Amino acid sequence: MMRNYIKYTVVFLLTLCFISCKKDFLERTPGVALTEDEIFADPAQAARFADNAYNYLITKYVRLNDHRGTVSQASDEAVSGNSEGTVTSLNRGLYHEHSTQASLNEIGDVWRLMYRGIAIHVKMLSRIAEVPPSPNATVPIFDHKRVEGEMRFLRALSYFELTKRFGGVPIIDKVYGPLDELNLPRSTYAQVTKYILDDLDIAITKLGTDTEYGTSNYGRPTIGAALALKARVLLYAASPLNNPTNDIAKWKLAADAAAEVMKGDAGLARQTYALQASYADVLNLPNSPEYIMIRIKGNTPLAGEMMQDFSMSPGSGGAQGQMNPTQNHVDMYEMANGKAITDPTSGYNPATPYVGREPRFYNNIIYNDLPWQGRRIQVYSTITNVNGVPTTTYGLDWNPGNITYTATRYYCKKYWPEVYRTVGGSTTLLNYIYFRYAEILLNYAEAQNEFLGTPDASVYNALVAIRARAGITKGAGVYGYGLKDNMTTAEMREVIRHERAIELSFEDHRWYDIMRWKIGATTIGVPMKGIDVFRNANGTFTYNVITLGSGFQKVWNERQNLYPIPRTEIYKSKGVLTQNPGWE
């Protein structure tokens, strides 16, 4: 019977393993297997068991196909110069193909990872009362209150990662025995969202602040993290994908939740957050007033985040420079005065496209002729004479005959800090950020704008804070920073969506924003573009925007607003799990 359950319900494999296969997950000392009762009778072992839940979180931007893909390359932010399985499947809408399902780790692997984490959360919460007090009550090995808060937060985060991809999913709310029925139906999106929010409301009462936890526990979820996740969950619940009737009350809940994070507390009953001074190093600091929750890890060498095999130009010693921002994304960056490059008064000159752009462009994008690591980036072609014969040659950072070089003539600076070099290279932090304060400001602005019907000063002020920090000049107008006075809700909506695309670029937001806003047809299902650069004889450059080849184009169908439930899970459920629309 047990074997049959495992065979037909792999999604719940870890839950079953806690019952019958303890060696894999409960063994803490090589050669010494511990029973469940022994684990939960020992505060130290119980703490280790709880900490194992962190191994089932998403922890990297570059996570598809092990280390060669991001959801940025599925969106309009970037393409993959050397497209591989998962990225190609997402780009071409082939999520449903049986041949790609097993390798499509944005779907199948996330489903399994989240449910394995949920199995730990449920098990820990079911037995937490059995864990005896720590010998030292002042510095407890196992803090019952904090651990409960963490388990509820992590369970909420895991279910949110599932709902933002799949919509409604099965809720696992107890430990299942060998004879229990495990073919569970999907709960609705609303039911899972309520379950998430219920967990978060409890977590908020159990968690502390970074100050209370101290440096040794920095990176664990805090009250602020729980409030931030609540704000994000409610924002997604209010968005067009999940709120087709545009229930304004849902936007109000989302705005209020973001405002709760923004108000902070000088009395330190919760954390107070702020934008850090510089946007340029937003991923690269050990701590920051902007960080609400990040993945803690040490300084990373080239091999640690696979920079050399993913982000770096081969001309600079990289194996594959696959992370290539599109011209679609590059054109979204405004001028330093806050005006769009399509505005005839902006000062933009297509002959010198990289002059006078807003500072975040220079923080995020590596472009032709950029001073970089002691030389200038060369993504151009030119004509040279070889034995009197005019011959086309190429710069160090671009070769059209080699797919390991950029396809768009851009590389991603956010994923390739300048210190990463193969000769005399250094290490640096490249944080995975779960929540930072700028997102909260953007969440608030979006929800408040939709709720009010006409944007008020608080919506403008949230954007002003972000754009001022970015270095955009104040300019004219009541609010300045390139923001038009007296915008309508629709006008402000587009401004906020644009601001998210720039401020949160390459940070795991854009792809899911496109899905929840249902704008794939106008962002993904359009020509993906790059730029052609020619170096003239006098050393100047000629720039021409080009449409990329067919291998870099993407498709979009409305069914892609949600992922399909992994086909293997549909088969194993004997018809209990229903598929998302369009993926049958």
Image: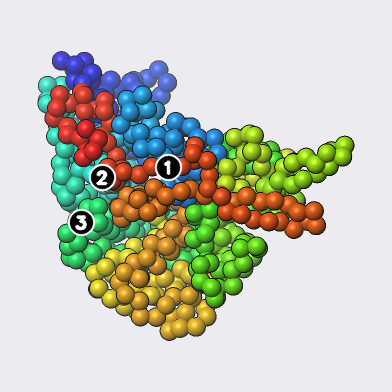
* Label 1, residues with CA under 10 Å away: few <14, some 14-19, many ≥20: many
The residue indicated by pointer 2 is 163
At 42% across and 47% down in the image, what residue appears? 75
Residue named by callout 1: 554
Indicate the quadrant containing the N terminus: top left, top right, bottom left or bottom right.
top left
Residue type (three-letter) at the residue carrying disc 1? Lys
Mark sitting earlier along the chain (3/1): 3
Q: Residues within 10 Å of mark 2 (few under 14, many from 20)?
A: many
State the CA–CA distance, disc 2 to disc 1: 24 Å
Image coordinates of residue 465 in percent, x first then y, are 45, 72
Disc 2 + disc 1, Cβ < 8 Å: no
> In this rendering, which labeled residue sits more in front, label 3 or label 2?
3
**Looking at the image, residue 202 lies above or below residue 347:** above
Which amino acid does the dot numbered 3 rest on?
Asn
Q: Position of residue 185 (x, y in %)?
A: 14, 34
Vertical order, 353 against 454 (above or below): above
Label 3 belongs to which residue? 243
